[in-house]
Image (cartoon, rainbow, N blue to C red):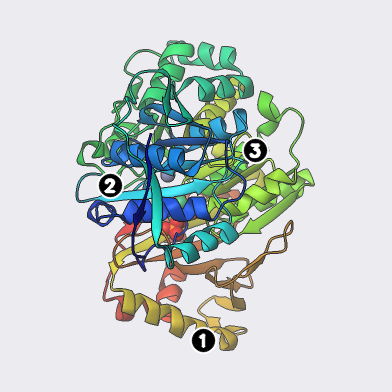
Amino acid sequence: MNIITVSTQPFNDQKPGTSGLRKRVPVFQQRNYLENFVQSIFDSLDGYEGQTLVVGGDGRYYNRTAIQVILKMAAANGFGKVLVGQGGILSTPAASCVIRKYNAFGGIILSASHNPGGPDADFGIKYNIGNGGPAPEKVTDAIYDRTLTIEGYKIVEATDLDLDQLGTSTLGSMTVEVIDSVTDYAELMQSLFDFEAIKALLTSNDFKMCMDSLHAVTGPYAKTILEGMLSAPVGTVVNGVPLEDFGGGHPDPNLVYAHDLVELMFGDNAPAFGAASDGDGDRNMILGSNFFVTPSDSLAVIVANANLVKGCKGGIAGVARSMPTSEAVDRVAEKMGIDCYETPTGWKFFGNLMDAGKVTLCGEESFGTGSNHVREKDGLWAVFFWLNILAVRKQSVEEIVKEHWSIYGRNYYSRHDYEGVESDRADKLITELRAKLASLKGQKFGNYEVDYADDFSYTDPIDGSISQKQGVRIGFTDGSRIVFRLSGTGTSGATLRVYLESYEPDSSKQNLDPQVALGELINIADEIAQIKALTGFDVPTVIT
Ligand code: G1P
Ligand code: ZN
């Protein structure tokens, strides 16, 4: 088989963001655009010759096309074997699971996560290292540097492979194995949770659940595990067929985009448990009957109840949360006497802590929760964790969360997103905010006094690498916080995220609407950052 080297020219916009390179499909369709990035990944790695690469994606538009290119380039560059999910499908946590299980050198995941899909919507590509987790910054920086100087890429001349047929074939001297997308992941879940107890719950007459896969990648996983292995009634999983455009929806499991599920769960005769996952299956939203569990609270409840779950029986080494995530989990960790790490936004920062055995459970406010079973956040894992808790405790979701608040206090929490802000305006807002930081300490705003104001910087405790400018935080003397940062996953304009948090230890005051409880802080955020004036937006586009 012929290996050819195609000459190319660099693109100057291939800097990976919070989670890989994300662009509109037409950008990826430019001649050599995808190829340049893939070659830059390979050029930044050492010692992969003859090794195994895992490839799969969330099934969105362009997934299959990209996989064919990656297979031919992997063959030309000397990989020994590629494991690819059937039909090109691997959820992000399943890809992480497969990389780890088969000791692969790394993996390439095709996804733009929760962003919409289709010919004019988003596509993405990211590289995961041998531990199954997203490449750390030193790798993504090297990839980016390479994209700026690349002059050629290697590819074999071959016809496309059949991705739908399980089994092994060859491409030049490389083996390609099409694997079942679900099996390895399902086995892992079975090893972590008490499937018998969950099965008893799911088949009992007075328990009903709804899993909304939003026409994204978790459909086949949820159907096989929930409706198959766990015998939940057929129909428990809705929107379970992955579609290239996610049925025209926005595959983001939150109160705004998972509206059908929200309507069901807040309607009459709502099921006891509702959940949704995003495009690539790493996010989750947890709902009880007429009750929404804030992701930060979900993490805290999971940690507090970890002893009920088989996979955590050996105890928890420590926990971690991203900086903007609420401090609810800190309180649980303190009581348990374990360490709680605060990392920058993005899953890649958890990998080192987990590899070093310092952290067992971790999460982010952005509907991401996970553990050291893989090195990605894992939407369905969180669903099974909750089901396991419900099966053992035999209480409702609402009862469990309220009991949690009565023990640890409630961290009122909300995130306000301003999507599609002009980049210049967003940059100006952050620049002006940074300039103010030094003078904020001690200033009073209504009932609140600023305790500290800084731009979060993180020194990785394992490898000493430093990540700066990870979000502006303003902390108040009563423990409340406001955090500002710009999204690193968007594909057009800028998204300003404002994270608001306050703490309420008094049980009789824990039942307010968070927007009410946080009302004064919301106004203070605007006063300090001049959000309305500088963005031109009167209200956030999404509130979670
Ligand atoms: C967002 C979330 C972040 C998450 C990432 C990938 O990134 O805020 O927590 O890790 O998506 O799912 P952002 O757009 O804020 O950079
Ligand atoms: Zn995702």
Please tell me which residue lies in front, 378 or 174: 174
Between marks 3 and 1 in the image, the one whose residue lies nearer the viewer: 3
Q: Is residue 464 left or right of residue 134?
A: right
Q: Amino acid at mark 3?
A: Asn
Q: Amino acid at mark 2?
A: Pro
Cα distance in 3D space between marks 2 and 3: 29 Å
Q: Which image quarter holds the N terminus?
A: top left
219 versus 22 height, above or below:
above
Q: Which residue is mark 1?
A: 436
Mark 1 residue CB less than 8 A from any atom of ligand 1 = no
Instruction: Characterize the local packing of mark 3: few (<14), some (14-19) or many (20 or more) Cα atoms within 10 angstroms.
Output: many
Q: Is residue 328 left or right of residue 435?
A: right
Please tell me which residue lies in front, 163 or 123: 163
Report the residue at 41% width, 48% height from top.
154
Label placed on residue 116: 2
Cα distance in 3D space between marks 2 and 1: 36 Å
Q: Quadrant of ligand 1?
A: bottom left
Q: Position of residue 276 (x, y in %)?
A: 39, 35
Q: Is residue 467 visible?
A: yes
Q: Earlier in the sequence, mark 2 or mark 1?
A: 2
Instruction: Characterize the local packing of mark 1: few (<14), some (14-19) or many (20 or more) Cα atoms within 10 angstroms.
Output: some
Q: Quadrant of residue 391?
A: top right
Q: Which residue is mark 3?
A: 372
Q: Amino acid at mark 1?
A: Lys
